[in-house]
Image: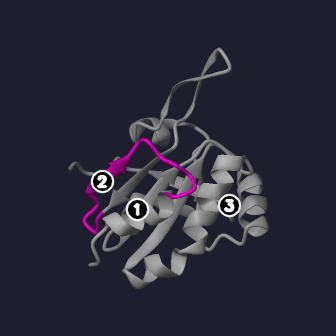
């Protein structure tokens, strides 16, 4: 696999999270279209529900990325008690670099937006696995099952 594109994004609390901060940790970086939408809520809660299992497997960081603003992320995380950070990819540069911001079609209309995707990043910053066809209800368990413990 290849190295991860460099990023610096703000989380819901206004803290800057950089790719360099992930060095030494296995991370799961998942991209989702928007806070409080049915599929995105199922996916986020799925990661939240088994977050302790991720931690037990030395997968320390689960990070969600969408183009929503920090205030939206904060409300979403609080409402569902998400134990991980949500990052603001508002400029779409990072989502584009990771291949997750593309032309989408919905109800006959075309628009640019985030395509639900997940990347597993190893402790050296190398992309281990890419998930492009994500089923929100089962995705968190699928990713956990695929990643070896370090």
Residue appearing at x 20%, y 50% in the figure: 1
Extent of the magenta region:
122-138
Q: Is residue 3 left or right of 108 when viewed as pictured?
A: left
Q: Is residue 24 above or below residue 5?
A: below
Which residue occupies the foreground of this view, 15 or 47?
47
- The residue furthest left is 1
The secondary structure that most of the magenta stretch takes on is loop
Q: Is residue 66 above or below residue 63?
A: above
Structural crowding at the residue carrying mark 1, measured as other residues with C-alpha within 10 Å and reported as few (<14), some (14–19) or many (≥20)? some
Using the numbered discs, state the Cα–Cα distance from disc 2 to disc 3 in whole angstroms: 26 Å
Structural crowding at the residue carrying mark 2, measured as other residues with C-alpha within 10 Å and reported as few (<14), some (14–19) or many (≥20)? some
Using the numbered discs, state the Cα–Cα distance from disc 1 to disc 3 in whole angstroms: 24 Å
**N-terminal-most mark, 2 or 3:** 3
Residue 143 in view of the camera = yes
Question: Horizontal and vertical percent for residue 121?
Answer: 33, 60
> Where residue 129 is drawn, which disc sits there?
2
Question: Disc 1 or disc 3, which is closer to the eye?
Answer: 1
Say if the magenta span includes residue 132: yes
Which image quarter holds the C terminus? bottom left
In which quarter of the view is residue 110 placed?
top right
Q: Give the structural element (helix, strand or loop) at label 1.
A: helix
Question: Disc 2 or disc 3, which is closer to the eye?
Answer: 2
Q: Is residue 116 above or below residue 4?
A: above
Residue highlighted by disc 3: 12
Q: Give the structural element (helix, strand or loop) at label 3.
A: loop
**N-terminal-most mark, 2 or 1:** 2
Residue 84 in view of the camera = no
Residue highlighted by disc 1: 143
């Amino acid at each position: 696999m290849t190295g991860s594109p460099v990023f610096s994004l703000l989380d819901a609390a206004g803290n800057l999270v950089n790719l360099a901060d992930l060095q030494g940790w296995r991370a799961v970086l998942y991209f989702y279209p928007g806070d409080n939408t049915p599929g995105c809520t199922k996916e986020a809660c799925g990661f939240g529900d088994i977050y302790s299992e991720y931690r037990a497997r030395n997968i320390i960081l689960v990070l969600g990325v969408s183009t929503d603003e920090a205030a939206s992320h904060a409300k979403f995380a609080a409402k569902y008690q998400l134990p991980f950070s949500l990052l603001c990819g508002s400029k779409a540069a990072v989502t584009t670099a990771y291949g997750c911001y593309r032309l989408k079609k919905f109800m006959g209309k075309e628009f640019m937006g985030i395509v639900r995707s997940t990347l597993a990043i190893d402790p050296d910053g190398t992309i281990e696995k890419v998930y492009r066809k994500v089923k929100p209800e089962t995705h968190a368990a699928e990713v956990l099952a695929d990643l070896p413990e370090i």
